[in-house]
Amino acid sequence: PVLRYQTDDPSPPPLRVGVATRFVDGRARIGSEISGTVPLGDDDAVGVTRFDQERRTTTVVESKVRAPQLPAPFVARDVQVGAPWSMDSDGVVRVADDAQSYTISYDEPLDETEAVLAAAGDTGAGLQDREEYLAVEPEIAGELAQVLDEVVEPGDSQLESAQAIQSYLRGNDFTYSLELDERLPGEHPISQFLRTKRGYCQQFAATMVHLARAEGIPARFVVGFLPGTGSTQERVVRASDAHAWPELWIDGVGWLRFEPTPGGRAASLPGYSLPQQDTTSSTSTTSSSTTSSATSTSQDAAPVEEADPGTEVQWQRPLLLTLLVVALLAVLPLPALLLRERARRRRGSPQEQVEREWERLVEGLGDLGIDAPPGATPRVSGDHLVQRSGVGGRGTEQMHRVVTTLEGARYAPPGRPEPDEVEQVGRDVDDLLARVRRSRDTGRRVRAALAPPSAIRWWGSLPGRVVDVVTRRR
């Protein structure tokens, strides 16, 4: 362990210790000299947009990190430490002497709604030395442009482009691995990573910085620690929690953290970093097509001609396809889902009801492609699911309530949980599943609806359950 701390933040952010803007041969270079100090609370100086976020406090009770590094969330609003300290324009807090304990207050990160609105409004602070955060090594500029042509849609906003780049790096083509393949002679490290698609946080973060810069989005490389494991009463950060991630400048918002590194060795996904579902275009398309159809009908409503036999085939095919889908729903997921829902709605003890809600949450997230670690405790599973789903601060609080109530149902004295706690768990599970469902792509949502893995497993276990029933009756 390198840090032990307490916090009132149910989803604490990573702890920053250094920022790099300069790259040499694809590798970030973090200077030891402070570029300049800024006073606390100067949002323009550190490049953030202040909303009505809740103020959070982290108290480090034991630190083995040596000066001048002082691990701290971004961006610090108040620092209480028994040594001279300063904060530079990158929001990095530095201390003159080793600090074994200290307290830092900070604002919660923006949620997805605030970030999108701010980016649309373009009312944030200006960026000093913008060109410094846009520099791209010329030998890989062409390769970066080719990737961006495939990943970013023309006309995308800065935030949409950043979301697309993050989604690309977190896609199935890339693999997290501490063992890197050998570089070809004269090959640039970023080129090697884009070719092999294998690496760890440094490769993912540096590549996103380069892709963002090539797209015209200022970006920087940040190093620090993941928020560790544990509860708000005590979290532990270990040396293995060392991490790197990119921060991108979004006009109207300022610096925002992104998380291109996939899997469990990464911080939670900020809600704003996930593509938002665009319902406006589909609605307008449906509306316009309906209007067009109505206009066409009114214009062509003249003499009635004999139907063309080819027209019959045209409407028969969609009908047959619809009937096939209905048949598949009747055979595969629907009965399983109905029977499971019936079992969950059976009145039982509060403990049984909470267990069924937890099962519904885990299975529902699994159907959406987010599986809990096999055999893990509820708390470990909850932390894992939060990190993988990127449900944001509110979703983290909901998951914390669900896990706490579940632990109380399993281990607390009789009488727990209370009926209102059981109802709250049900509401939290509904909201968590809805939030994650909205964040998934259309293909994933369709698969979860038509052929959910949990329903397939239910059918697969059916013969065994029938045998068990017959055996017990005998």
Image (spheres, helix red, strand yellow):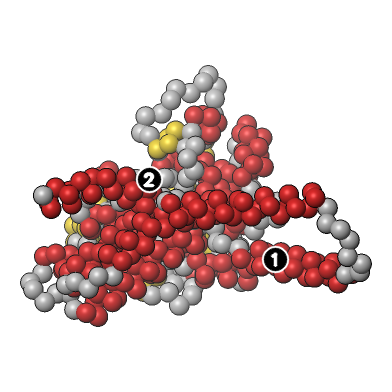
In this orientation, does residue 117 appear?
yes
The extreme left residue here reads 413
Residue 30, image x and y in percent?
44, 44
Q: Residue at x 45, y 77 (%)?
A: 52
Horizontally, is 174 left or right of 376 in the view? right
Residue farthest top in this picture? 185
Q: Secondary structure at mark 1?
A: helix
Q: Nearer the viewer, mark 1 or mark 2?
A: 1
Q: Is residue 374 above or below residue 319?
A: above
**Which of the 4 quarters of the picture holds residue 138?**
top right
Q: List the residue tagged with mark 2.
A: 263
Between 3 and 70, the residue placed more toward the observer is 3
For image coordinates 65% across by 37% down, the residue present is 146
Instruction: Give the residue at mark 1.
Output: 286
CA separation, marks 1 and 2? 38 Å
Q: For this rendering, which residue is in front, 111 or 448?
A: 448
